[in-house]
Amino acid sequence: MNTSGTALPGIGLPRFLEQRLANSGTISAQNAAIYFQPGFNARIDTLINSGTIQGGINGSGLSTFASAIELGPGNSIGTIINSGTIDHSVCDAGGTCYAAISNTGGSIGTITNQGNLTSGNAGNSAHGITNSITGTTGN
């Protein structure tokens, strides 16, 4: 799947195919731009981003706050190659800021970042990546 314009998140892909997501445009959402439903064993083998992937871009209330890429248990991304921007841009009313990539029980094999991985916030609770399991990270 290639996106050269603006793509909307939430399209499920069958696992039996090699899953490659190449983004050179914009993937953005009020919540998570790329979200893996916990427990569904979803996978993107290779995620290549030279554009913008941004979560939590606008709105109000609790529904606004999510990371740009969120993985839950059973989900995985084999390789992330980023030369663009992966960002979460807002904090909630309590001051909690969200990470660009949040991995809570899934797996990420390799992250190669030559772009920007930011929470978009300067507060001390801001993170580019929050992670429970990662194979390797190259920069």
Image: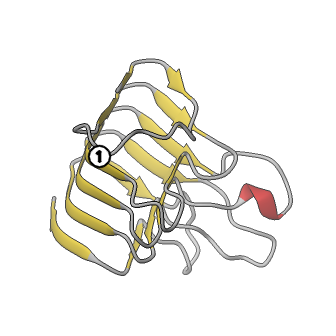
Q: How many marks?
A: 1
Q: Image quadrant for the C terminus?
A: bottom left
User: Does residue 35 lie above or below 47 as drawn?
Assistant: below
Q: Position of residue 59 (x, y in %)?
A: 81, 48
Colouring of the image: secondary structure
Q: In the image as oriented, which residue stretches furthest toward the top?
A: 5
The residue that appears at 44% across and 36% down in the rendered structure is 52
Left-right relation of 64 to 69: right
Left-right relation of 26 to 45: right
Q: Position of residue 117 (x, y in %)?
A: 38, 56
The residue that appears at 57% across and 41% down in the rendered structure is 10
User: Does residue 37 lie above or below 8 as drawn?
Assistant: below
Q: Image quadrant for the N terminus?
A: top left
The residue tagged with tag 1: helix, strand or loop? loop
User: Does residue 60 lie above or below 123 as drawn?
Assistant: above
Q: In the image as oriented, which residue stretches furthest toward the right?
A: 61
Left-right relation of 60 to 56: right
Q: Position of residue 32 (x, y in %)?
A: 59, 52
Most foreground residue, 104 or 95? 104
The residue that appears at 39% across and 69% down in the rendered structure is 74
Answer with the quarter of the image where residue 92 lies. bottom right
**Dot 1 surroundings within 10 Å: few (below 14), some, or many (20 or more)?**
some
Please state which amino acid type lies under the numbered disc 1: Gly
Check disc 1 and report the residue beneath it: 115
Q: Position of residue 94 (x, y in %)?
A: 78, 78
